[in-house]
Image (cartoon, grey):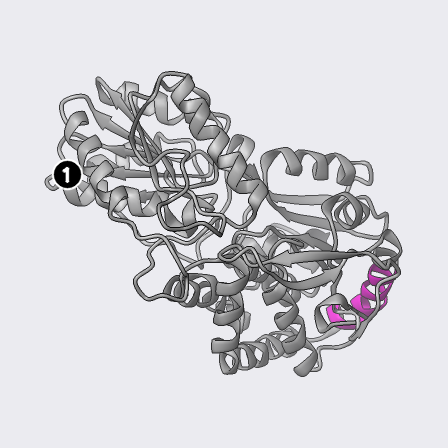
Amino acid sequence: MSEYERIFIDGSWTASKSDRTIEVVNPSTEELIARVAGGASADVDLAVEAARRAWGTWSDLPAEERVAYLRELLRRLGEREDEFVTTITTDIGVPLKMARRLQFGLPMSILEGFTDTSSLPTDYEIGNSLITHEPIGVVGAITPWNYPLHQTMAKLAPALAAGCTVVLKPSEVTPLSIHLLADAIEEIELPPGVFNLISGTGEEVGAALAGHPDVDMISFTGSTRAGSLVAQLAGRGIKRISLELGGKSPNVILPDVSDLERVVKSGVGNCYLNSGQTCLALTRMLVHKSQYSDAVEIAAHTANRFTLGDPFDPGTKLGPLTSAAHRERVRNYIEVGIADGARLAAGGVDAPAGLDRGFFVRPTVFAHVDPAMRIAQEEIFGPVLCIMSYDDEQQAIEIANGTQYGLTAGVWSADDEHALRVARRLRAGQVDVNGGAFNPRAPFGGYKGSGVGRELGPLGVEEFMEVKAIQR
């Protein structure tokens, strides 16, 4: 049995109750690089039992002792940075520089934010009531394949800081960095049962975890469709759910911008982040009709300059998609866009020149996109940008808000106050004004079909806590 075919329960690596394994493929070369356990519901039972046993002692620890473990984990991960970055680049296909900055650097920033007690809620009084916060209990965490370490840390760090114990089901598509994380957790001697890892499919392990009667909360990140199924399973037990789901985020460029070229280039780069496999990507660019032709030309020229190839090559700007199945899904959406009458300004369904292996998709730009088209309404999750025109600001806001999603949005204007007024009218959990940087300590989550609850920062900790009122 290889190191990746084990699961981590009650403080030690062990064999799964199932003899199934799942192949892990390098998306850049299509070569088999590992196999992981295809866990079973019996594994979930054992992990939840271990987490339940550990919860009382862990939750009773002073908060300072709990975050001390997180400080030690931060140190251990930092010592293994190169190993993590190399593994992530191989497992996901993201270019090396991006793997270091985003896929590893961002979760480290998130973890660092929970290494002291300042993020934890404090008791307070209202009249004759003392308001306290208590850890909710055993948390089932289900994480996706696009940012495996980041999405895991966004759940694990605040849950542990709050005093919860965790059973983690990572994606079986990109699991290798999470096995390295479990190794590091073993090294810091976190008490047995506080953290447990079971690899496997969503249909088997994910469903068993979401519906388990001894799990107090499910924290899920993934597609809106899968999130709905998880919520149904969790709802049978009336357990807390936190869902970070899909997006179809608008990027509203107001006609008073002073440098259209810079703004459009920034928007293209945002859309193609992680090969477009980013829930918060600004995939719908809204441009005033007076600037529309120029914006399309700039976007197409920018897209054509993205270099695809080996993620370990310093010249590569865009890596592959993460799996063959997802590549076909994205290509299908490009075909749908063409069939529905959108104009292909850059990219397309053909394989990139010179790349015979790997799950690559050419960076694509669609013009003449009607807001009702499928490519404008449905999450594609690939390097596909849809550019739409609008007549006035009210129409821009209506188009921006006109999908089932509400995760993120962007607004650009020469007048910050004007941009802020528009940002307040957008139905999204986060809005970037004039390229505002992502803040890992601000609450993250969506409106409408983009989710329930918030991750990161103090509100992210509160998701893992119950509130009690004590009258006296």
Q: Name the residue under label 1.
A: 260
From the viewer's perspective, is 172 left or right of 452? right
Under circle 1, the secondary element is helix
Residue at 51% x, 83% y: name it: 79
| Snapshot quadrant of residue 256 | top left
189 magenta-colored = no
- Residue 431 sits in quarter: top left
* Viewer can see residue 267: yes
Q: Position of residue 249 (x, y in %)?
A: 40, 35
Dividing the image into 4 quarters, which one contains the N terminus?
bottom right
Name above or below for residue 129 compared with residue 314: above
What residue do we see at 28% from left, 20% from top? 394
| Residue 352, image x, y percentages | 37, 44
Residue 422 position, x and y percent, is 28, 32
> Could you tell me which residue is drawn at 71 percent across and 45 percent down?
240
Residue 136 visible, this orientation = no
Magenta stretch, main secondary structure class: helix
Packing grade of label 1 (10 A; few <14, some 14-19, many >=20) is some
Region of the chain picked out in magenta, as a range: 46-59
Q: Is residue 438 positioned above or below 395 on the image? A: below
Quadrant including the C terminus = bottom right
